[in-house]
Amino acid sequence: MASGLTSGSFAFFVALVPKPLVIAHRGASAEKPENTLAAFARALELGVDAIELDVHVTRDGVPVVFHDDSLRRLTGQSGRVAAKTWRELAPLRVRVREPIPRLSDVLRLTRTREIVQVEIKRGVPVAPVIRAIRTARAAAWVIVASFDPVVLRRARRVAPAIPRMLISAGRSSPATLVRQLTACAAKGLSVSHEALRSAASVRYFQARGFAVWSWTVNDPARMRRLARWGIDGILSDNPALLRRTI
């Protein structure tokens, strides 16, 4: 487990934790409503190495942990997260049960106990997210991630010391991904497991100095195969299953 890590170096925690890292995708989202404090608390109970979460920013500049840009799927309410104030979002419940947390709430819960990958959605302003991370004094255990290289380049300018990961569905060529990783000075690639066809596809990036994580893996056979291939981290909705399997 990544308990007690205080270094901001991506290589530091990758080296200290036995591979592959067990990463709770949106928290323990197979057991609790995704991206909620309940899901993250359950992940802590399971002793995961890291959690992954998604961030949007409200109209009044508050980073909130929520996957979709629309409220409909998770809360049953209409509207977009970015069009609401925090005061408007606070009464809503995810899957009728759990409140939408602010990023600051999650960082307080996880403080120094595990690595947190903060995925900033495409088009979401970077500065409020970085400000929340700094206010929580969480830069030592946070990774900023995005599908959008532009977001990562902005994060690099605002907070160069916070590690970055590029997220990819794997549709671009490996050479293109390496160019994107290099351009935003990312330390690792988080890629769809469906895009990884062999151990060689993992080693291609590792040989160039990038950690490789894979999402979102809920099948035990696939978990075992990726572990054999030397993957650095596996994201799963069911971290309890992942922990038992690898």
Image: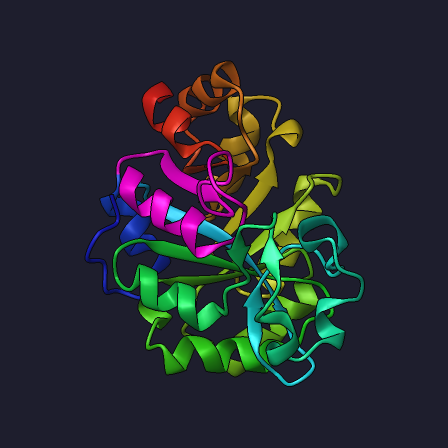
- Residue 11 lies left or right of residue 145; in this view the side is left
Q: Is residue 37 magenta?
A: yes
Quarter of the picture containing the N terminus is top left
Quarter of the image that includes the C terminus: top left
Residue at image coords 49%, 46%? 208
Q: In this view, does 116 lie to the left or right of 171?
A: left
Q: Where is residue 115 in the image (x, y as percent from the top left)?
A: 35, 55
Query: Is 69 on the left or on the right of 190, as rendered?
Result: right
Residue at point 42%, 50% (across, down): 38
The answer to if 95 sits in the magenta stretch is no
- Tell me where residue 5 appears, x and y as whole percent: 23, 58
Near-viewer residue (182 or 133): 133
Of residues 206 and 131, the one nearer the viewer is 131
The front one of 65 and 224 is 65
The furthest residue to the bottom: 60
Percent position (x, y) of residue 13? 29, 52
Name the residue rendered at 57%, 35% in the picture. Answer: 216
Which region of the structure is painted magenta? 18-46
Q: From what the image shows, is residue 128 above or below residue 235?
A: below
**Residue 88 in sight from this viewpoint:** yes
* Place of residue 138 in the rendered image (x, y in percent of width and height, measured from the top left): 35, 71
Identify the residue at image location x=66%, y=62%: 121
Vertical position of residue 23 compared to residue 114: above or below: above
